[in-house]
Image (spheres, grey):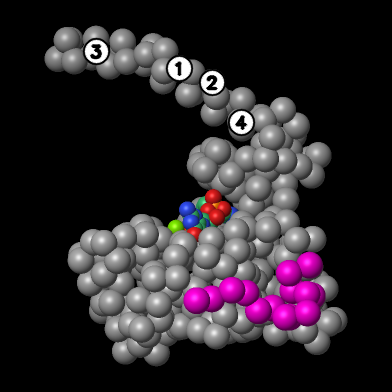
Amino acid sequence: QAKSMGRNTLSFFDPAMQAEMSDNARTASDLRDGLRRREFVVHYQPQVDKAGMIIGVEALLRWNHPERGLLSPAAFIPVAEDTGLILPLGLWALETACGQLAAWSKRPETANLSIAVNVSVRQFRHPDFVDSVMACIRASGIRPQRLKLELTESLLADRMEITIEKMGMLKSLGVTLSLDDFGMGYSSLSLLKRLPLDQLKIDRAFVADVLTDPNDAAISRAIIALAQSLSLQVVAEGVETIEQRDFLAYQGCDQFQGHLFAKPLPVEALDALLSNPVSGMVVVG
Ligand code: C2E
Ligand code: MG
Ligand code: MG
Ligand code: MG
C-alpha cells in the first residue's frame, strides 16, 4: 500500500511528466492570449466527388503562434478541451466557416460548396450549442444545408437519449450531420440506425492500409456497405494515393479527402484553386 503510494508520489515528480504539465499550463494561458489576439486561422481541405470535382471542404483549425509557428490541432485541441477554451475556440471556428460560406454563396461557382466543421464532445454537450449554431446560421444568412457538423463516435459512449434528441434539433435547423473517424469507436449498428445522420467518414487509419492490410480493406468495405444500407453518404479521409482512391471508389465510396487531392489550405490558396480555369477540378487518376 505505502509502497505503491510512494511510487505514485514519485511519478508525480517525474521530470518528463512535470515538463508536460507545465507545457500544458503554458499552452492554456497562451490559448487565452491567442484567442484575444486572433492568432487562430482556419485552413480548408477540399473534398471531392467521384469525378474529382470539389464539392466542399473541411475546416481545420491552425494556431499561428507568435513563437512556436503554425501549430496543428494536436498541439492545442486537447488542452483547449481540458480547459473549456474549446467553447470560444469552437464557436469562432463555426462563425468563421459560416462567414466563408456566406462569401462563397455570392459567386455562382462556389455557391454550392459545403463546409464541414469539427465539433468536440464538450461543445456538443454544452446547453447553448444548438442555439449558437442557429445564431451563426442567422447572422451569416447561409443555407443551413451547406453547413456540415462533424461529430465523433465518443459522443455515443453515453447519454444516448439526449444526444439523439440534440442531433434531431440540429437536423431541424437544416444542417448536415456527419460521423467523423468512423470505425474507431464502439457505435453499434442498432444505435447507428437511430441517429439522424447524413454521412459517415471512414477514419484515415483504415484508409492508410486499405491496400496492404486485408483487415482494413474488409473494414472499409463493411463501412461503405453499412452506409449504403442506411442511405448515408460515405467519405474517406486521408486518401493519399490513386490506388486507395480507386479501391474505395470501386467499393462504392462517394467522396474523398486527402493529400492526393489537396492538403488543408489557407483560404487564399483555396480560393485560387477554386477560381482557376478548370474550376474546382482536381487531379484524379
Ligand atoms: P479530423 O477531423 O479527422 O481531420 C482530418 C485530419 O486528417 C486533419 O488533420 C487533416 O489535415 C488530416 N489529413 C487529411 N488528409 C490527409 C492525408 O492524406 N494524409 C495525412 N497524413 N493526413 C491527412 P489536422 O488538420 O491535424 O486535424 C486533426 C484533428 O484536429 C481533426 O481530425 C479534428 O479532430 C481536430 N480539429 C481540427 N479543427 C478542429 C476544430 O475546429 N474543432 C475541433 N473540435 N476539432 C478540430
Ligand atoms: Mg473531421
Ligand atoms: Mg476525421
Ligand atoms: Mg481522423
Q: CA distance from mark 4 to mark 1?
A: 14 Å
Q: Amino acid at mark 2?
A: Ser
Q: Is residue 25 left or right of residue 137?
A: left
Badge 3 is on which residue?
7
Q: Is residue 202 above or below residue 263?
A: below
Q: Circle 1 sits in a helix, a strand or a loop, which is it?
A: helix
Badge 1 is on which residue?
18
Badge 4 is on which residue?
27
Q: Is residue 117 left or right of residue 244?
A: right
Segment tinted magenta in the rendering? 272-285
How crowded pointer 3 is (Cα within 10 Å; few <14, some 14-19, many 20+) is rated as few
Q: Circle 2 sits in a helix, a strand or a loop, which is it?
A: helix
Considering every residue shown, the one lying at the far right of the view is 106
Contact, CB < 8 Å: mark 4 with mark 1? no
Q: Amino acid at mark 4?
A: Thr
Q: Is residue 188 left or right of residue 78?
A: left
Q: Amino acid at mark 1?
A: Gln
Q: Position of residue 234 (x, y in %)?
A: 43, 79
Q: CA distance from mark 4 to mark 3?
A: 28 Å
